[in-house]
Image: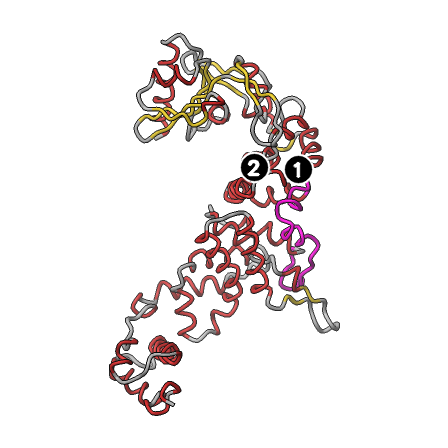
Amino acid sequence: MESRLRDKAEGIVRRLAQAGHAALWAGGCVRDLVRGEEPHDYDIATDAAPEEVQALFEHTLPVGAQFGVVVVLDGDDQFQVARFRADAGYSDGRRPDAVRLADAREDALRRDFTINGLFYDPLKGEVLDFVGGQRDIADGIVRAIGDPDARFAEDSLRLLRAIRFAARYNYRLHEPTEAAIRRHAHELVRVSAERIGEELSRIFTGPNRGQALELLRTTGLLRVALPEVQAMVGCTQPPQFHPEGDVFTHTRLTLDALDSPSVVLAFAALLHDVGKPLTHSAPASDADRIRFSLHDKAGAHVARAICERLRFPAERTEAIVALVLDHMKFAAVREMRQSTLKRLLRSPHFPDGLELHRADCLASHGDLANYQFCREKLATLAQEEIRPPRLLTGHDLIALGYIPGPTFATILTRLEDAQLEGEIATRDDALALLKREFPLSHTPDHN
């Protein structure tokens, strides 16, 4: 796929050049090439006006014509073609108030970080570096282009982007750039919740997630973006269960223990113990220990508030909340009744829940016995045992003379429990249990 994209991106540059225009690959794709990686997408910068780009290519979308941006469509692939520009003023902390025509050098100087300010001419095989980006890639540095205060004042989302790039590549923040992030951290509130949520999602699903969380803390961004997670800092835990340290340290280690998480799993790990600062209870005596009673339930409420604040889709929010609420269930899997265990194993979020439990354990005591127990149960239990077909339904109860009402749920749950426990296996067994435990004349709906 990548070689196909590269060929198409080169073809766009060639077509523009044949029409007399300057055209270069720009930004992240060049960064990746310099790093020896194959880009997943290509952006093109040119001196051609949007209408000239549209005239040269059959399928285009004018997604940002006011900023000189056109998307060129080639089959299922899209390539952003943007006119060289210089920006003037960012009164909203997001978009330039005005733009003017510029050359490649000026265009590079308006960009965020040196590693993203590179150009590449695929026809000549040359990198154009006006900002020292190649040097910073070689040295592993995230450095703002020019005055870092000016760059962050232009677009406050760059504060989070700096953290993402530093973590993604395991680079260090240039000291003046890091100092500017601290000075401007409070301005993150100017960024919409959706954009913050999207950037945090990229951060916590990328590599070195724990490092990113620590950078968010040390730069002051965590206190602004996720004050509930900031509250974990210094929240002590019982050392016999958490030798790693406070809740924040545990959360950082949990994030790092995940294996290529989705947004749902990453945020569930980030927030699984977010209720602990609210439920922290100091030991009442030397024989007692620190406790966090019902921190899973408190955490689920906080997680919902965070997800809604970040404008996450409802389905994602519900999944994250469910994982936070259920994460403590894994501590008791070996003592559970068979019916309770089987319901857990078949829950829609169980695979993510099991991975969260594994990471949770690795980030604390390291005991994976319950994790292995669940894996063994999944391997040995047939689907029919975990999710057997109902022996009796609500329609059956009506046909037998039961009046629909709250009792139906109690009856059907009891029948399913008995089935999951192996207490009953046939319809006749179910009817016998029904007659014995819920005789028609004694059900509340018949009183």
Image position, residue 61 (x, y; %): 38, 26
Q: Which residues are magenta?
A: 218-244
Image position, residue 181 (x, y; %): 67, 34
Cβ atoms at labels 1 and 2 below 8 Å apart: no
Image position, residue 245 (x, y; %): 67, 55
Q: Which residue is mark 2?
A: 164
Q: Distance from label 1 to label 2 (Cα)?
A: 18 Å
Q: Quadrant of the N terminus?
A: top left
Element carrying mark 1: helix
Q: Which residue is mark 1?
A: 187
- As rendered, which of 86 and 135 lies closer to the eye? 86
224 left or right of 296 in image? right
At x 42%, y 16%, the residue is 122
- Kindly identify the amino acid type of the residue bearing the numbered disc 2: Arg
| Residue 227, magenta (yes or no) | yes
- Kindly identify the amino acid type of the residue bearing the numbered disc 1: Glu
Quadrant of the image occupied by residue 124: top left
